[in-house]
């Protein structure tokens, strides 16, 4: 049996649902540009009549109980999140690699200046010297050109050292970032699971958005795997290492100054291994000293080999009257090369003591500086050696740049797909706005109708004969 | 696919960013005037450009070397040409001296003239060049030093029977320096000096000296003493010294001609290398300008489009 005021209650529910719809639409519209916001939708169900009624009835008695908001849900595709994050790790791996390679190329720029032209200048001065081998002025020019070559080595070494220090400090910032991000995610996990426990799932949509944003951020550092738990928490693995689970949280430690530098998880105390992400890129390109990962250390090594060959050649070039080689350059690495005191004080140190015009030692030196020799276990001239590693660097950089382009476009596609599902469409929300407004008006009309019906029942019924 | 505002914004910003990047790259090329600012701009071109630069710089140096070398050789040639005239005069003088019509007093006069010619040769050989004696050899000192009845060239007594060590000075003109056991291969360089010892001669034959100055001294002595016993054999030594001089002059001429050829070849090479360098390194201004303009236009169009695309939604139409 229908109660007298059932219709009014139904209309009230309609009004409430429409208002909630307008609220959520408003929330979507105002957050259309909020970073990480996932669009929300009210899940609406019609209220069923009481099927547990004690008495069987064939009448439609209890139908028309109206409508209820069962949930305010987020529209999100977990699988897409996973794919997006793994591509994000790839992308940021290439991006970080490219950053360091770009810096390296900026330092080792042989297009404008560099070791090659200063070597060439030295050879030119030796050619002039070979034509007037008894003149102090030529010896002086040779000294100053040798100084330029050494300064170039020193400068390269210093800039590479600076680049290494900078990259390590950037890495330590990243490490801190990973640790704070993990702790923030843990905090949000905690709040979300509490809300779940209290049955307030609807209240945590915004917290989940925040958490997803942080997880996206975490994904740029390494390849992660996210597992959702039933209590609303998430569990995170980074390259098979469990790093976040409930109250458990691991921490990254960068041990420095050590050579080679070590990045380890506190739990295992062992150097981390990663499949992708910017941390992997940084470690590879700071420490990389093999043909597969040519990092700052690799180019430092190449420079040192070249510097040591240069010093050896110069030190063997000139002999005194006792046939003893005159030491011209001290040091054997790019940073430590310097002119020997004896030569620095007296530029004519390299002249023959008896004023001889014999230029054969000079020609021999020119041949050594320009000809092929064994540098770092390969036959090449000094100039070719420089060309080789500069060209290799350019090729490496371009290879990474093209990989980055591919990876960026994939990540971009996935981001577009994700936004296609989760982001706000203003047109859609505008339409929703109209729909809920009209629904509200219609519910109000229902209310009026019910009111008129009640008015009829209360005021107009049973007036016959009054 | 459901299109959201974020989708439109991202696509728009990505494209705008790409347009700006292309425009910035083109601007950099225009303002620097160079196609290659880093190796990675075009690796294979950069590799070639570096090689071309090396070659160009080297050939410039070699051309400088050749100029200096030719200057040296010309100085030597001038002296040797004068010496040629002196020997010719000495030869006619000797023919004259042999004649029986000459008495002791005439022969003494002829001897004096011979002394004078011998002195001229010493002067020619010791002539000072721009920064050192023209025939400085490898020790850098004035070549001929006269002692009491002795002549030494570059500290070597010309009457000595032991053959001297003639080192020679060599210049690299880009033939590809080669060494054989620490000694430079003469085929890979060009010799820049002429040895006075090789022209004037050294050693003794049957008690008569080979050296021209010593020969002149002996001849003069004989004439002064009116003793013509060794006259014939000494005269022959003058002739062979003349022959050696002519060989040296021919050699100098040949070296000079060779240097001229090499220089011509190098200058042509240099032209080609410069052209290649331009192609590899310099911006083709006309085509770059056109490209720059079209990139600028694209960029402006995307900016204009932005003002239309971004805020457009149903709200522009509902009241």
Image (cartoon, helix red, strand yellow):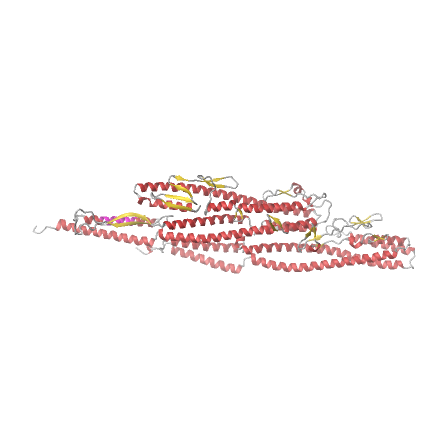
Identify the residue shown where x is 69% and y is 48%. Answer: A361
Give the percent coordinates (x, y) of residue B253. Answer: 74, 59
Q: Residue visible at 30% across and 53% down?
A: A432
In percent of width and height, residue B155 lies at 78, 48
- Picture quadrant where residue B72 is located: bottom right
Report if residue A434 is visible in the image.
yes
Q: Is residue B99 left or right of residue A287?
A: right
Q: Which residues are magenta?
A: A12-23
From this viewpoint, which residue is outermost toward the left?
A465
Of residues A29 and A339, the one nearer the viewer is: A339
Residue A80 placement (x, y as % from top left): 38, 51
Choose between A254 and B297: the one closer to the eye: A254
For residue B83: magenta? Answer: no
Point out the image quarter for the C terminus of chain B: bottom left
| Front residue of this view, candidates A419 and B128 | A419
Considering depth in this image, is A252 or B55 the residue closer to the camera?
A: A252
The answer to whether A320 appears left or right of A193 in the picture is right
Q: Total label count?
A: 0
Residue A205, position in %: x, y? 33, 46
Q: Is residue A140 left or right of residue A244?
A: right
Along the horizontal axis of the image, is A74 left or right of B247? Answer: left
Give the quarter of the figure containing the N terminus of chain B.
Answer: bottom left
Q: Taken as a whole, is the magenta stretch helix, strand or loop? A: helix
Q: Can residue B33 be seen at all in this image of the molecule?
A: no
């Amino acid at each position: 049996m229908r109660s007298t005021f059932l219709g009014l209650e139904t209309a009230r529910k309609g009004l409430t649902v429409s208002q909630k719809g307008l609220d959520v639409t408003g929330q979507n519209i105002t957050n259309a540009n909020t970073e990480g916001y996932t669009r929300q939708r009210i899940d609406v169900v019609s209220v069923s009549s009481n099927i547990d009624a004690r008495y069987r009835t064939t009448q439609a008695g209890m139908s028309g109980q109206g409508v209820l908001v069962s949930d305010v849900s987020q529209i999100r595709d977990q699988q897409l999140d996973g794919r997006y994050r793994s591509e994000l790790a790839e992308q940021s791996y290439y991006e970080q690699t490219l950053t360091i390679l770009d810096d390296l190329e900026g330092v080792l720029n042989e297009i404008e200046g560099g070791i090659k032209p200063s070597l060439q200048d030295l050879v030119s001065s030796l050619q002039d010297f070979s034509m007037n081998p008894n003149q102090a002025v030529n010896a002086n020019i040779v000294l100053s050109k040798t100084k330029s070559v050494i300064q170039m080595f020193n400068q390269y070494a210093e800039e590479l050292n600076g680049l290494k220090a900078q990259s390590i400090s950037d890495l330590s910032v990243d490490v801190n970032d990973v640790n704070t991000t993990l702790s923030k995610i843990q905090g949000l996990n905690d709040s979300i699971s509490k809300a779940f426990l209290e049955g307030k799932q609807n209240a945590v949509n915004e917290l989940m958005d925040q958490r997803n944003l942080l997880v996206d951020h975490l994904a740029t550092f390494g390849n992660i795997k996210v597992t959702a738990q039933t209590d609303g928490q998430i569990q995170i693995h980074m390259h098979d290492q469990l790093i976040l689970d409930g109250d458990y949280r691991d921490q990254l430690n960068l041990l420095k100054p050590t050579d080679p530098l070590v990045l380890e998880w506190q739990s295992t105390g062992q150097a981390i291994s990663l499949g992708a992400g910017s941390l992997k890129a940084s470690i590879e390109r700071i420490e990389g000293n093999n043909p597969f990962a040519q990092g700052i250390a690799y180019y430092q090594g190449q420079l040192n080999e070249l510097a040591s060959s240069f010093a050896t050649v110069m030190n063997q070039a000139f002999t005194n009257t006792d046939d003893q080689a005159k030491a011209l350059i001290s040091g054997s690495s790019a940073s430590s090369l310097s002119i020997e005191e004896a030569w620095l004080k007296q530029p004519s140190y390299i002249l023959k003591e008896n004023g001889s015009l014999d230029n054969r030692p000079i020609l021999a030196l020119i041949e050594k500086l320009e000809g092929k020799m064994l540098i770092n276990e390969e036959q090449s001239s000094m100039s070719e050696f420089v060309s080789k590693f500069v060209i290799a660097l350019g090729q490496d950089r371009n290879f990474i740049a093209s990989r980055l382009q591919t990876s960026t476009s994939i990540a971009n596609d996935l981001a577009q797909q994700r936004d296609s599902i989760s982001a706000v469409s203003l047109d859609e929300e505008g339409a929703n706005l109209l729909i809920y407004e009209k629904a509200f008006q219609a519910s109000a009309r229902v209310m009026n109708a019910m009111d008129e019906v009640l008015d009829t029942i209360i005021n107009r019924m049973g007036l016959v004969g009054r | 696919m459901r299109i959201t505002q974020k989708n439109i914004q991202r696509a728009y910003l990505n494209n705008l960013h790409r347009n700006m990047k292309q425009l910035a790259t083109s601007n950099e090329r225009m303002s620097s005037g160079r196609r290659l600012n880093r190796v990675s701009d075009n690796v294979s071109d950069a590799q070639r450009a570096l090689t071309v630069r090396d070659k160009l710089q080297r050939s410039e140096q070699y051309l400088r070397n050749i100029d200096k070398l030719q200057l040296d050789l010309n100085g030597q040639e001038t002296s040797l040409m004068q010496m040629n005239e002196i020997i010719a005069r000495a030869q006619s003088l000797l023919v004259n001296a042999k004649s029986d019509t000459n008495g002791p007093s005439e022969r003494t006069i002829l001897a004096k003239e011979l002394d004078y010619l011998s002195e001229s040769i010493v002067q020619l050989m010791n002539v000072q060049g721009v920064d050192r004696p023209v025939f400085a050899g490898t020790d850098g000192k004035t070549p001929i030093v006269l002692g009491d009845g002795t002549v030494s060239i570059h500290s070597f007594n010309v009457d000595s029977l032991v053959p001297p060590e003639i080192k020679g000075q060599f210049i690299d003109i880009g033939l590809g320096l080669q060494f054989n056991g620490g000694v430079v291969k003469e085929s890979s360089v060009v010799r820049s000096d002429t040895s006075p010892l090789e022209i004037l001669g050294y050693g003794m034959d049957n008690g008569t000296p080979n050296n021209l100055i010593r020969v002149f001294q002996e001849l003069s002595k004989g004439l002064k003493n009116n003793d013509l016993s060794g006259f014939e054999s000494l005269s022959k030594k003058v002739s062979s010294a003349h022959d050696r001089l002519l060989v040296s002059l021919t050699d100098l001429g040949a070296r000079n001609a060779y240097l001229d050829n090499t220089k011509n070849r190098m200058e042509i090479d240099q032209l080609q290398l410069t052209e290649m360098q331009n192609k590899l390194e310099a911006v083709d201004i006309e085509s770059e300008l056109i490209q720059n303009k079209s990139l600028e236009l694209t960029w402006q169009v995307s900016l204009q489009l932005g003002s239309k695309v971004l805020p457009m939604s149903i709200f522009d139409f509902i009241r």
